[in-house]
Amino acid sequence: MLDDDRLARADRILDTAKDLLLRWGYRRVSIDEIAKRAGVGKGTVYLHWRSREQLFFAVGAREAVEMIDAVVAAMRADPTEVALHRYMRRFFVEAMRRPVLRAIFTRDAETLGAFLASPARRPLEGAKLLASHDYLAVLAEYGLLREDLRPEDLDYPLPTIVFGFFGVEPLLPPHLDLDLEAKAEHLADILRRVFGPAAEPAATAYTGAASRAITIFGRLGRDFRDAAYTTPER
Amino acid sequence: MLDDDRLARADRILDTAKDLLLRWGYRRVSIDEIAKRAGVGKGTVYLHWRSREQLFFAVGAREAVEMIDAVVAAMRADPTEVALHRYMRRFFVEAMRRPVLRAIFTRDAETLGAFLASPARRPLEGAKLLASHDYLAVLAEYGLLREDLRPEDLDYPLPTIVFGFFGVEPLLPPHLDLDLEAKAEHLADILRRVFGPAAEPAATAYTGAASRAITIFGRLGRDFRDAAYTTPER
DNA sequence: TGATGACCAAATTAGCACATTGGTCACCAA
DNA sequence: TTGGTGACCAATGTGCTAATTTGGTCATCA
């Protein structure tokens, strides 16, 4: 079978899995049902992924790729998007707009159930996706971080703040319903005040940093794409 | 029966309930068991609280009173403790050091189970306990907030940040294990940078605001104490 | 008159037969 | 020869009933 056909088939299966995941929730979706609706035999699914968990990981990884691509595209179009507060704002919005990523980041137990605790999902959250050390090092190098901060100083407070934005929703009083953009704006404002440099950086800092960051996130996107379509080796 | 004896009995029951709650978790603790260990009849428990939920709410409320008392004492000893970032730092530390409050704020399902979703627990979290509008209004009045902020501007971002600090723990990579004070310091630093005034306020601002805040939190503490020992009326 | 525990309805658990599901692999069609 | 398939299997889950536990009440008692 041609590689293109293989990829197309993988996508068909992933589309089906994603659709059922969002409609029925993780525990209700069986491999049988996915295979049937995708028009392939059950065994064929296992020619693409090692296990059920891996398959659903791939569903998430594909959305992660979309999100990363959107981030990279934004940085290409406007290098100031590389700044931490701009990047995280976009990350937040792009993640929340994609149903599977939103379910993962908001820890939506209704939709994801046991998958939230499964080890296969691990790479989908975690600091690596959120803000790699490589990226933060680039920010520091180009003067886009507060002068007294080293990248590792963000290890605790940055994920903590961002996690708060993904997770508070169910705890807030209902009368407080900001739209996604307003929340993202709050997040950006906070990150700029807490981690941003005192003075506005030069335009050249942005272009230099953006070019480096695009490389970093481009690689990250390719890694996720590879992970999503990985064939099980034995 | 004398009021003092009544209170002592209530405390004995609450001590027992708290002990079992922390050892066995919410769902495993029965009223029968609590009554037996507290040396009273089951009916007696219902002379103090209307329902099982109310009883466990009282367990939390009593710890909330302890916490609020600690906060008030700190403000009395040092009026600069009234500043938002100092107050929330202390709030965070005092809450995390008390097992029942920590379970509530970290949403520890293992310990609290169904109680997390029960309406009786509602008053124990929520913005009221965290930072009432009255308190924020005092801060604004005395110039202890960023000049361009009105109290209601904090409604969304403040609980969001604080929630993050209570809730991230299970998501962080294990190698990152700051002690409680270090986490609290991060929280304080963030809140000062995001919500604090540009210039250091005068000492008189702190004393004035602290005196007002002590009144507010003193009342809140009394309300919780009353709620904890409330007799069910019919 | 305050405290108690037997009592009851409602919810939970235990036990068991039956159905479903993740994953494998012998077989087959191209 | 080989990529695709679905019958197959162990293990997990589901429905069902009987038996137990539990929250809450209240007649009775000290």
Image: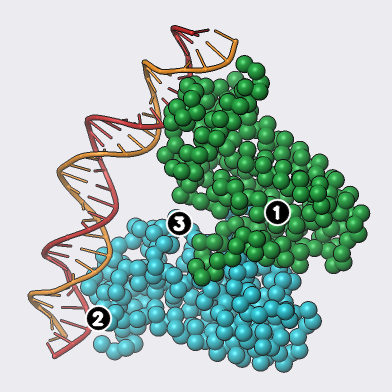
Chain colours: A cyan, B green, C orange, D red
Q: Label 2 marks which chain's residue?
A: A
The residue under label 2 is: A234
Instruction: Evaluate whether residue A79 shows in this view.
Output: no
Total residue callouts: 3
Q: Residues within 10 Å of mark 2 (few under 14, many from 20)?
A: few
- Give the quarter of the figure containing the N terminus of chain A: bottom left
Looking at the image, residue A232 sits to the left or right of residue A136; the answer is left
The percent coordinates of residue A172 (x first, y second) are: 63, 52
Q: Amino acid at mark 1?
A: Arg
The percent coordinates of residue A190 (x first, y second) are: 71, 68
The residue under label 3 is: A109
Query: Do callouts 3 and 2 point to residues on the same chain?
Result: yes
- Above/below status of B95 relative to B123: below
Q: Nearer the viewer, mark 3 or mark 2?
A: 2
As rendered, which of A77 and A50 lies closer to the eye?
Answer: A50
Q: Residue at x 79, y 81 (%)?
A: A199
The percent coordinates of residue A223 (x first, y second) are: 44, 83
Q: Amino acid at mark 2?
A: Arg
Q: Nearer the viewer, mark 1 or mark 2?
A: 1
- Give the quarter of the figure containing the C terminus of chain A: bottom left
Pointers 3 and 2 in contact (C-beta within 8 Å): no
- Above/below status of B141 relative to A75: above
Instruction: Evaluate whether residue B63 shows in this view.
Output: yes
Q: Residue at x 60, y 47 (%)?
A: B98
